[in-house]
Image (cartoon, rainbow, N blue to C red):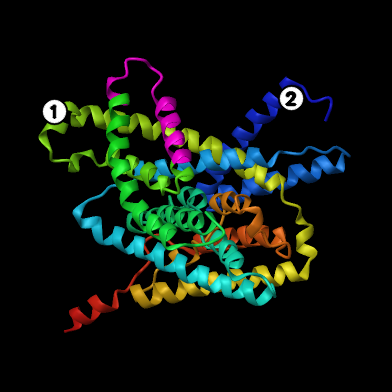
């Protein structure tokens, strides 16, 4: 690749952005996830490059940086897209417990599979890998729910966002030290209210920056503050992603604030203008980051793992367990058809990000990275088939309401 010039790079970058936009248009027309097409593009580019006898190594740090930035942008985008009303509180509660219970049972199920499959492997190491494989990817869910009803869309957005936050919190807890102590457990539990208090302070601080800043450079200043808070919070093992989500929710639901001093300083008109501005530029930035993250990740996938029967078997068992456990929970708790929510189990950006952050002392040498690739591709395909089979305004039967009507 010694003949690669700045013009070639510029042409390639812009060409990939245009291609990603076309994938988004295609997604709305065919319901094929644009993320899947981006992954396929990355894989195809790798094989085209190899066929010419050239090689191009993308540093792992690039993937991690894009993943971290993308995660912040996508969670912020989710917060700015969700409305909190009294009528929607049951939906928020339902999506939170769905994310929590499914994450816990999925982690337990996958840890059992890994502990059985990878003999003589410490249970805690298997648990860390199970956590990584049990987080639903909001980066894939959010762009793939546009065709669903408002209730289904909001349920899945909340659920995926909560799954990301919970997954990172639990992952940080189990990778913080080689010995889990009472002190570390107490700090983990206390970190949640600490993060909520921090969220309030951050929200008003950032609003001051946006409202009173006389310089036109606003968004990237706010974004830089969010990144600093996220990274700083992670170093202190705080669920700082919760702060990002809360900031978006507060901005988008400012009318719920009833304290008059705040209303006089931050008028509804100013906050609504700020929310519209943030929604526009956050959506654009999230689209850009998502594009290059998944293309680069796809570029790093070597499909040779498809020839390994052990990888295919272990990956299939894990995916089947994830799907079965989700089915059991949704049927037992909701007791009515929740199609296509059952199929929205994609693993993606957060799974890759956490996988690369597993400490060296918790690495499992016997775990083939191909299993990770297989689970990501298989769960994304499952989501695609569920989306394709879904029809608008499906008939859903609430058995409890049906019985009440009959009585």
Rendered image quadrant of residue 264: top left
Quadrant containing the N terminus is: top right
Sequence-first disc among 1 and 2: 2
Q: Secondary structure at mark 1?
A: helix
Q: x, y percentage for residue 57? A: 76, 39
Give the left or right position of residue 395, taking residue 40 as reference.
Answer: left
Going by the picture, which residue comes out furthest to the left? 260
Foreground pick, 127 / 36: 127
Q: SS at mark 2? A: helix
Residue at far top of view: 214
Which residue is labeled 2 in the image?
8
Which residue lies most toward the right here?
53
On the question of residue 281 being in view, the answer is yes
Q: Is residue 271 above or below residue 362?
A: above
Nearer the viewer's eye, disc 1 or disc 2? 1
Residue 227 in the magenta stretch? The answer is yes
Q: What is the total number of numbered labels drawn onto the structure image?
A: 2
**Residue 101, how many percent across, how many down?**
41, 68
Residue 172: percent from left, percent from top? 50, 54
On residue 46, which mark appears? none
Q: Tell me the quarter of the image containing the C terminus.
A: bottom left
Residue stretch rendered in magenta on the structure: 210-232
Question: Which of 404/121 is in front?
Answer: 121
Instruction: Confirm whether residue 73 shows in the render.
Output: no
Q: Residue at x 30, y 29 (%)?
A: 274
Q: Hey, which quadrant is residue 294 in on the image?
A: top right
Residue 136 x/y as whole percent: 50, 58
Magenta stretch, main secondary structure class = helix
- Is 174 one of the magenta-colored residues? no
Question: Gap between marks 1 and 2, in whole Å?
Answer: 53 Å
Q: Which mark is residue 264?
A: 1
- Structural crowding at the residue carrying mark 2, measured as other residues with C-alpha within 10 Å and reported as few (<14), some (14–19) or many (≥20): few
């Amino acid at each position: 690749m010694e003949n690669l010039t700045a013009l070639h790079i510029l042409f390639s970058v812009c060409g990939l952005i245009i291609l990603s936009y076309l994938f988004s248009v295609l997604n709305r027309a065919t319901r094929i996830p644009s993320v899947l097409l981006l992954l396929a593009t990355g894989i195809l580019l790798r094989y085209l490059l190899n066929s010419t006898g050239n090689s191009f190594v993308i540093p792992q740090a690039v993937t991690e940086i894009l993943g971290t930035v993308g995660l912040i942008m996508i969670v912020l985008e989710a917060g700015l897209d969700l409305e909190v009303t009294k009528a929607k509180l049951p939906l928020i509660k339902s999506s939170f417990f769905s994310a929590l219970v499914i994450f816990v049972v999925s982690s337990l199920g996958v840890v059992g599979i890994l502990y059985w499959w990878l003999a003589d492997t410490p249970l805690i190491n298997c648990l860390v890998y199970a956590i990584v494989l049990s987080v639903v990817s909001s980066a894939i869910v959010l762009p793939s729910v546009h065709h669903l009803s408002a209730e289904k869309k909001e349920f899945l957005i909340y659920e995926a966002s909560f799954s990301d936050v919970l997954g990172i919190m639990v992952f940080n807890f189990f990778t913080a030290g080689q010995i889990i102590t009472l002190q570390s457990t107490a700090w983990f539990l206390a970190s949640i209210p600490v993060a909520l208090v921090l969220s309030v302070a951050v929200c008003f601080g950032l609003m001051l920056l946006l409202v009173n800043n006389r310089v036109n450079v606003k968004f990237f200043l706010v974004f830089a503050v969010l990144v600093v808070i996220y990274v700083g919070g992670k170093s202190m093992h705080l669920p700082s992603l919760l702060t990002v989500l809360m900031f978006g929710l507060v901005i988008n639901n400012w009318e719920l604030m009833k304290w008059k001093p705040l209303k006089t300083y931050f008028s509804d008109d100013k906050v609504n203008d700020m929310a519209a501005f943030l929604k526009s530029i956050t959506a654009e930035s999230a689209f850009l980051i998502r594009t290059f993250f998944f293309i680069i990740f796809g570029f790093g996938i070597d499909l040779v793992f498809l020839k390994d029967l052990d990888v295919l078997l272990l990956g299939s068992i894990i995916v089947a367990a994830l799907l079965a456990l989700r089915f059991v929970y949704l049927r037992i708790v909701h007791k009515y058809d929740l199609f296509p929510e059952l199929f929205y189990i994609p693993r993606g950006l957060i799974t890759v990000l956490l996988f690369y952050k597993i400490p060296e002392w918790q690495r499992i040498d016997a775990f083939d990275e191909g299993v990770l690739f297989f689970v990501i591709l298989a769960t994304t395909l499952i989501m695609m088939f569920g989306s394709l089979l879904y029809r608008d305004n499906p008939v859903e039967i609430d058995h409890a309401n049906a019985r009440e009507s009959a009585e």
